[in-house]
Image: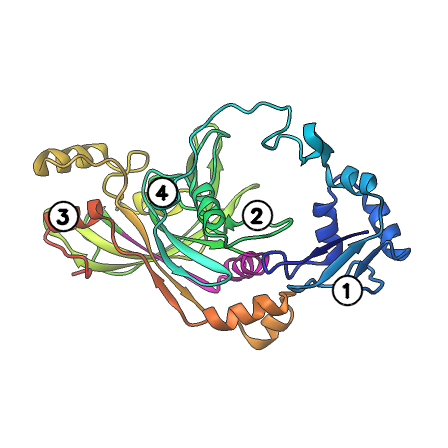
Amino acid sequence: MQKITVGAADAGQRLDKFLQKYLKEAEKGFLYKMLRKKNITLNGKKADGSEKLEAADEICFYFSNETFEKFRGVHVVSGGALSTPGAAGSTQKNPAKAAPDASKLSIVYEDDHVLFADKPAGLLTQKAKPEDISLNDIIAMYLEQGGKTSGLTFSAGTANRLDRNTSGLVAAGKTLAGQQLLAFLFKERLIEKYYWCIVSGTAESPLHLKQYYRKDEATNTAQLLDKPLPGTQTAELYAVPLARLDEGFTLLRVRLITGRTHQIRAQLSAAGHPVLGDGKYGDAAVNRAFSARHGYPLRHQLLHAKEMIVSAPAEEMAERSGLSGEALRELRSLAGKTISAPLPASFASCLRFLGGDEDGK
């Protein structure tokens, strides 16, 4: 008999989903058969797989060691130690690559279930290629080094993305309950996302931009259309001028309603207000002139995810959300919070060149 104890990181998921990940080599039908025959029990009792796991729950497997190891995807290596394929100590060889540096992680908010990090421009949120080091990897290393995650099947991960050269707030789930909650909040638009950017042109009044969007995968660019076509999605944002800056620039505060790739940059450029420093949708002549005038190289767009405001859902929405008890408790803790990330030094410097300041004046 083997016994495992569910930790906080894995709590909140259905027992059958947990078993499919933990015994990854077992067929789904086999797992349900083992539950029916009480060869897998939950807290010493028969279970059908629909039960929601809580921290400290005990799952017992009445298998032989060989069967257990087989379905776990574990095999014996020299000396009798257990190893998973591809893990350290196995016969597979992995090419050496740089390790994520957890000291580079800037956290602006953290609790038992979630964290909000301030991503620097130039860092990917998630890998584009296997050899990439991303914010996701750095967060995982931070949690591992701090002993803050002990999931048997759970892997911490980011819940939203920023373009590589956009800085600012990214939310991540430290536990399954945290991940489930963040996914729910973003899907239901219960997290308001606000960006600051410096744009060309004088914006005198608020902008409401709503268009139809599709991504051109071949060129990795956003296409904006005035009418829906097959494969298009709505792209919507609100932009409010915070300050009229020198040299014909404006500091905007953008509320992103939808979250499409390159959306803010593409929509503002189409509206006649390209983001300063943007090499894809921006005005190359304006970028060159700014750099020459101030002796300051623009290495990325001046676009920063500055604030996230967490709203509480209506009671009936929370009840039908399917969130675990732990996730609902975390929701009550987060509701009403405003999470902020300071402007990066490059952004603040450019603001000062143009007569503005970090207070948005």
- Residue picked out by circle 2: 155
Comparing labels 4 and 1, the label whose residue is closer to the camera: 1
Disc 3 secondary structure class = helix
- Residue picked out by circle 4: 266
What is the span of residues highlighted in magenta in the rendered image?
Answer: 175-196
Disc 1 secondary structure class = loop
Q: Is residue 138 above or below residue 238?
A: above
Q: Are marks 4 and 3 in contact (CB under 8 Å)?
A: no
Sequence-first disc among 1 and 3: 1
Sequence-first disc among 4 and 3: 3
Sort mark 4 into few (<14), some (14-19) or many (20+) by Cα contacts within 10 Å: many
Q: CA distance from mark 2 to mark 3?
A: 47 Å
Which residue type carries mark 2? Answer: Ser
Comparing labels 1 and 2, the label whose residue is closer to the camera: 1
Q: How is the image coloured?
A: rainbow
- Residue picked out by circle 3: 248
Quadrant assignment, res 115: bottom left
Q: Is residue 200 visible?
A: no
Which x, y percent locates residue 48?
83, 60
Comparing labels 1 and 3, the label whose residue is closer to the camera: 1
